[in-house]
Image (cartoon, coloured by chain):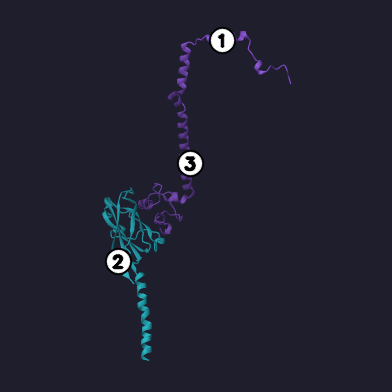
Amino acid sequence: MRTALVILIWALVTPLFAQQPANEEGRASFRVVDIYVDSKRAPLAAYQLKFSMTNANAKIVGIEGGEHPAFREPPAYDPQAIQHERVIIAAFNTGSSDELPKGKARVATIHVQTTGGDALQCTLKVQTAANPEGTKIAVEAQRLPISSITRQ
Amino acid sequence: MNNDVPREEDLKAPPRLIEALKQACSERIFVPPTIDQTIFKAAERQLSPSGRGRVRPFWWWSALTTTAVLVAFALVTVQWQRSANGRFALEDVNRDGQIDILDAFALALQVKQGRSLEKRLDLNGDGVIDEKDVATIAEHAVKLERGGRS
């Protein structure tokens, strides 16, 4: 009876240990990528950026707005980009110059899920940007992964 | 067989003809220098680079005409493509040839300022030009052509 109980416990516990390496390989990491736009001295009224990831095992899972009040609402994006590797985000604000960000401002945040332990590889390109008059301006875009949350 | 035809070894010119030909060869024909010069100048005109330059305008005009035809063809093609999909042309509010967030921004500014807007900007066809039309342009601007896959 005791032997049978030991065998039963061993049979139940062994698969749990056997599955652990597989879980580690398929571990999902959630990362947050902050998107900044630096408009220098010009007030930023509109922007359009293209974000792409080159990791084969990375996908976009969410997009939210930025820190500055003018761009706190989530930007426009194609819903088809969710669960895929690239997205075009764009937003505008018709407020006056003093209501708009100047210099470097966080305009959006992109949530990314990766599997495996690879570092996130992504590119960010400015497609267009404008001042309150609608005139195109030169801006710089930056991305900054600030945190990584790992879930098994 | 015709016996009247003389054989080749029997052919012989008359002595008077032979004498006349000898005299003709001994006399040198005088060609005036002016004729020489005229012929030389005519040849020079024909063969000189300036003579060949007369052909050049033809090639210039051919190249120019061909280029003009190609440019016209390209312009017509682009115009045709735009008119084939009128929605693209309509959404290009700022007329910069691209549909992006700046078109939505331009329309939003016009709506905010309460300007009288053209009917063509009623993109969703609800009879009103408002934020919904702005959103339509914004949606188009961020549309991924082939899904999210790169």
The secondary element bearing badge 2 is classed as: strand
Determine which residue is flagged by label 1. Answer: B22
Quick check: do tags 3 and 1 share a chain?
yes
Badge 3 density bin: few <14, some 14–19, many ≥20, Cα 10 Å = few
User: Quarter of the image containing the N terminus of chain A?
Assistant: bottom left
Determine which residue is flagged by label 2. Answer: A148
Q: Is residue B70 above or below residue B117?
A: above
CB of mark 1 within 8 Å of CB of mark 2?
no
Chain letter for mark 2, please.
A
Q: Position of residue A151 (x, y in %)?
A: 33, 71
Q: Distance between the residues labelled 1 and 2?
A: 117 Å
Name the one closer to the observer, A7 or A71. A7
Q: Position of residue A29 (x, y in %)?
A: 33, 67
The secondary element bearing badge 1 is classed as: helix
Determine which residue is flagged by label 3. Answer: B73
Q: The chain coloured cyan carries which letter?
A: A
